[in-house]
Amino acid sequence: MRRKIIAGNWKMNKTPSETIKLINELKPLVVTEDADVVFCVPAISLTTAIEAAKGSNIEIGAENMYFEESGAFTGEIAPNMLTDIGVKYVIIGHSERREYFAESDVTVNKKVLKAFEHGITPIICCGESLTQREQGVTIDFIRQQIKIAFLNITADQAKTAVIAYEPIWAIGTGKVATTEQAQEVCKAIRDCIAEIYDDATAAAIRIQYGGSVTAASAAELFSQPDIDGGLVGGASLKPDFGKIVNYK
Ligand code: PEP
């Protein structure tokens, strides 16, 4: 039985002082025994967030990370900078990073490899555009993203990874995928993992749905057989996130 994982993606929102305020506000609302709860916050607020979340069930994640150890990469964050302050998760390959910062399947793979090397759990994002969905190539496209993201990743590592299926047309648009669409793709991702590795790895890996999840849609989405929680953007900055975490 896979444990649910519900993560907030704060994107480029909240200053460090606003971070303390929001974590203090959300802390009592996201208490649960039934799921891992992760707040992925901007890099500048990671230390503050870890401090603010101490003693709670909230784990802190980064929204990005570079794939080199150190050196002349102005503006980038190295994996050991994250582990040094206690960061446990990192979002990799979010569609906004692919679109605005030229991340490719290959850089995603390099980052996933590096995250595992440092014991950070990657939340690996994949998802199709509206055109791809309308052209009927969604599953082919997602399978390609997954196959490249997991190149040279061992089965033991893959078992601990988190995949976030996020249709691009549903992110920040208020257009949530139907339960059937979300389940269909999450199952296809699990089947793809079984093909790359084996059934045990596919049964262990956690797959989230992301894209305009709200308190109203969470229960139905998260009760699908292949959906193990969510990656939540806009609603993770509001008290509603407590309802999403406690969706049952
Ligand atoms: C996201 O940023 O990963 C996301 C799913 O955003 P939203 O919930 O706002 O659509």
Image (cartoon, rainbow, N blue to C red):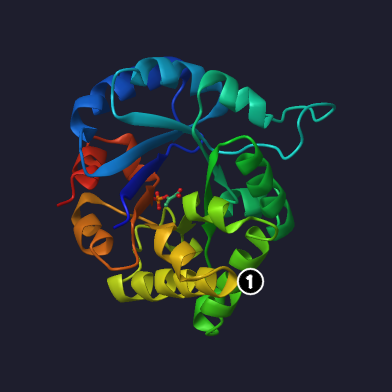
Left/right placement of residue 123 relative to residue 152 reads left
Left/right placement of residue 160 relative to residue 64 reads left
Q: Indicate yes or no: mark 1 CB to ligand 1 under 8 Å.
A: no
Counting labels gives 1
Vertical placement of residue 163 versus 233, above or below: below
Q: Nearer the viewer, residue 227 or 215?
A: 227
Vertical placement of residue 139 versus 38, above or below: below
Q: Horizontal and vertical percent for residue 32?
A: 20, 37
| Corner quadrant of residue 142 | bottom right
Task: Spot the residue most to the left.
Answer: 248
Q: Residue at x 52, y 68 (%)?
A: 193
Q: Residue at x 27, y 67 (%)?
A: 224
Neighbours of disc 1 within 10 Å: few (<14), some (14-19), many (20+): few
| Corner quadrant of residue 153 | bottom right
Judged from the image, the secondary structure of the residue bearing numbered disc 1 is helix
Q: Residue at x 71, y 31 (%)?
A: 76
Task: Spot the residue most to the bottom.
Answer: 136
- Kind of residue at badge 1: Gln
Vertical placement of residue 29 versus 111, above or below: above
Q: Horizontal and vertical percent for residue 53?
A: 35, 21
Q: Quadrant of the N terminus?
A: bottom left
Task: Spot the residue most to the right.
Answer: 72
Vertical placement of residue 115 versus 197, above or below: above
| Corner quadrant of residue 149 | bottom right
Q: What residue did someone put label 1 on?
A: 144
Q: Horizontal and vertical percent for residue 99?
A: 64, 54
Q: Residue at x 25, y 28 (%)?
A: 26
Q: Is residue 167 visible?
A: no
Q: Is residue 171 visible?
A: yes
Q: Horizontal and vertical percent for residue 180?
A: 31, 76
